[in-house]
Image (tube, rainbow, N blue to C red):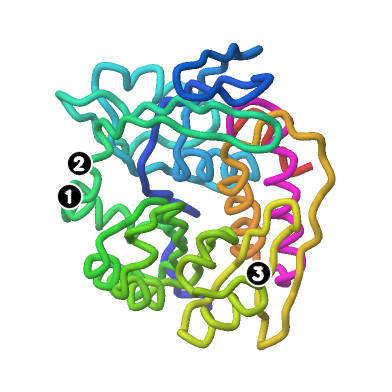
Amino acid sequence: MNRTPTKEWDVITIGDVFIDLVMSGFPAWPQPGEESFAEQLHREIGGGAAITACGLSRLGLKTALLASVGSDDSVWFRDRILSCGVSTALLHDHPSEPTGLTVSVSTSEDRAYFTYTGANKYLAEAMKTSEWILSMRNARHIHIAFPIDFHFLIDLSKDLHSAGCTISIDVGWQTSWLTDSRALDGLRSVDLFLPNEREAELISGETEPEKMLLWLVDHGISTVLKLGAKGSAMLDDGNLVRGESIPVTPVDTTGAGDCFDAGFLYGWLKEEPTEKCLRIGNLCGALSTRSLGGIDGFPKLD
């Protein structure tokens, strides 16, 4: 008989969230003092935690987002999250700060961000409350998408593992976090680390994907490596498994890595083989680039 208690959520994603203003179609990057005009403007929810949550929900998992938003603009944010099938029960309204804001300047090859942190600055302390920790224990899997305090990550991982949860983390391009020696202990405490190639190079000092993975695994860190147009890779019982890239003509690459996270985690939670998990992640990441923002282009399960 299966005595594992039923969890309310398949996945809770935790992290900084933003209202994204995405401008794309620039003919060239402007130099300081110059002006360049976008061909398109799109407003969307952003931040790795929100994008990954929406992707997981679109693939059929019961998902909640744990984040801090501004009370003045939370109605639009909550409505958009709900429209993606993600629960807003764990969102915290901050009374004085607005929701974080990012202006994304994007071409088909690359992107740059201008960001105001807003209510996100209160997430780290708010998530330490007993109420939120109890909520986290009620999920099969926790995905962390911000540079969480190292010591708290280790303690939280022990607590969540004891409650039967698994944990993944993708802090994004956070140079001070990734280069801190304490990051290794924090990453060892979770089940999956999902960096891109630049982030893995920063933490490992290696320049070749296989050597990055070997370095991370040798340091006790189970890693899924995102390689952009070159696909993805992971070591499985010491063997390098590659996920081939999916050819697409991108409109906007915003959030593609977070969409990969959703696809990979979906396969991983379904206990699919590593190669298939990478394939699903690559499909979700690639197809998400067909539309502006990180959500509209994300595929449904079929």
Horizontal and vertical percent for residue 251?
A: 72, 28
Residue wearing tag 2: 122
- Which stretch appears magenta? 272-294
Per the image, the residue denoted by label 3 is: 271
Give, as a three-letter code, the residue at label 1: Glu
Q: Nearer the viewer, residue 1 or 194?
A: 194
Image side of residue 3 versus residue 90, left or right: right
Mark with earlier residue (1, 3): 1
Looking at the picture, tell me which residue is in the foreground, 60 or 22: 22
Q: CA distance from mark 3 to mark 2?
A: 35 Å
Q: Is residue 28 visible?
A: yes
**In the rendered image of this protein, does residue 32 appear above or below residue 249?**
above
- According to the picture, the residue beneath numbered tag 1 turns out to be 125
Residue 219 lies, with reference to residue 193, above or below; the image says below
| Mark pair 1, 3: CA separation | 33 Å
The residues tagged by marks 1 and 2 sit, at their Cα atoms, a distance apart of 6 Å
Secondary structure at numbered mark 2: helix
Compared with 276, 95 (above or below) is: above
